[in-house]
Image (spheres, coloured by chain):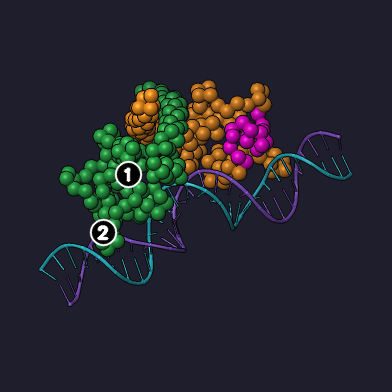
Chain colours: A green, B orange, C purple, D cyan
Amino acid sequence: MESISARTDTCASGPKAHPRPEGQDHYTISEVVAFTGLTAHTLRWYERIGLMPHVDRSHTGQRRFRNRDLDWLAFVGKLRLTGMPVADMVRYAELLREGDHTFAERQELLEATRRDVRTRIAELQGTLAVLDFKIDFYGGARAASESERV
Amino acid sequence: MESISARTDTCASGPKAHPRPEGQDHYTISEVVAFTGLTAHTLRWYERIGLMPHVDRSHTGQRRFRNRDLDWLAFVGKLRLTGMPVADMVRYAELLREGDHTFAERQELLEATRRDVRTRIAELQGTLAVLDFKIDFYGGARAASESERV
DNA sequence: CGCTTGCTTGGAGTGCACTCCAAGGTTCTA
DNA sequence: TAGAACCTTGGAGTGCACTCCAAGCAAGCG
């Protein structure tokens, strides 16, 4: 049970995660900034709103991120690219914390996201057609004015 | 010269524009709201920030949109779908107002946008791969737990 | 030990793209 | 011609996703 959620969480060896040094498993916030490209502000904010699963602390209270946090941040980065609202990501994180009985809901959430992404790709391909049309027009107009000039 | 910019502006018969009644050429703001799905607020705001080419007014000062405005709004809608910042659209509108000598710059702007759209599509396809992976995982886990149960 | 650099917090500020408001003038329908 | 529905304006407000700040504690180095 536990092992299944863990695998779900870290996504195993699936998609490539953020780069990181080998054989290490705790990082300061600035190291995570360097790996992920996020700012320290954003990392703290993610934690505050419940988007991080629970970050370890040093004995003096400083954050010590682990590899699983980097994996999670890599996945969050993907979700961010989909345009998913942060509130929905937080919802997904909550479902993860609640355990295996939320499998179905998590799957649905991801499927809804996938539908949105597919729609978005189709929209973008539509805009691409318009852009091609316009750009060809400008190209044609310039070619025409050049041939007039020649 | 003029005719070329006009064609560029309205995009001629190219991509399909917002639906509208045939054989009419002036519309109140609420009609344009119905055709475009934008709000009246947004239409006025577009005009204020210089994103509309110049909307006619009735003798009492109310807006009377024309077909070319609907064409332009359809194009702006496409640009909006690309994720282009409004400021860049305003820039494009300015270039249009400045006349034919801005052809090259307009073409560049559109080409840069097209590059962005292509990048965005590639990103989204990357996220799709991750989503597929995760969704398959949930599907597999559920199938496994069902077979255990059986 | 002192110095610099890094980390902590709650709360306030930013930029974008709208979104709404109040107060009043206009247009249409009965 | 009355009333409802629609239109006008400048300016203020909203929601999202950060982004920054001040004040103070922590860590590593010569």
User: Residue at coordinates 28% horizontally, 34% vertically from top-left?
Assistant: A15
Mark 1 vs 2: CB contact within 8 A: no
Q: Pinpoint residue A43: horizontal percent, then vertical percent.
A: 34, 52
Give the side of residue D9 with respect to residue C16, left or right.
right
Identify the residue position indicated by label 1 in the image.
A73
Residue occupying image coordinates x 38% and y 27%: B149
Nearer to me, C30 or A37: A37
Residue annotated with mark 2 = A58
Q: Which residues are magenta?
A: B25-40
Residue D27 is left or right of residue A1, and the answer is: left
Which secondary structure, mark 1?
helix
Q: Amino acid at mark 2?
A: Ser
> How many circles with numbers are drawn on the protein?
2
Please name the residue shown 42% across and 37% down the image: A101
Task: Inspect the magenta stretch and tell me whether residue A133 lies in it.
Answer: no
Residue B59: image location, x then y, percent: 72, 41
Q: Chain of mark 2?
A: A
Q: Categorize mark 2 by other alpha carbons within 10 Å: few (<14), some (14-19), many (20+).
A: few
Crowding at mark 1 (Cα within 10 Å: few <14, some 14-19, many 20+):
many
Viewer-nearest of discs 1 and 2: 2
Query: Disc 1 and disc 2: Cα gap in Å?
Result: 20 Å
Q: Amino acid at mark 1?
A: Leu
- Nearer-the-camera pick, B81 or B32: B81
Whether residue A129 appears in this view of the structure is yes
Compared to A82, does A51 lie above or below?
Answer: below
The answer to whether residue B100 of the structure is visible from this angle is no
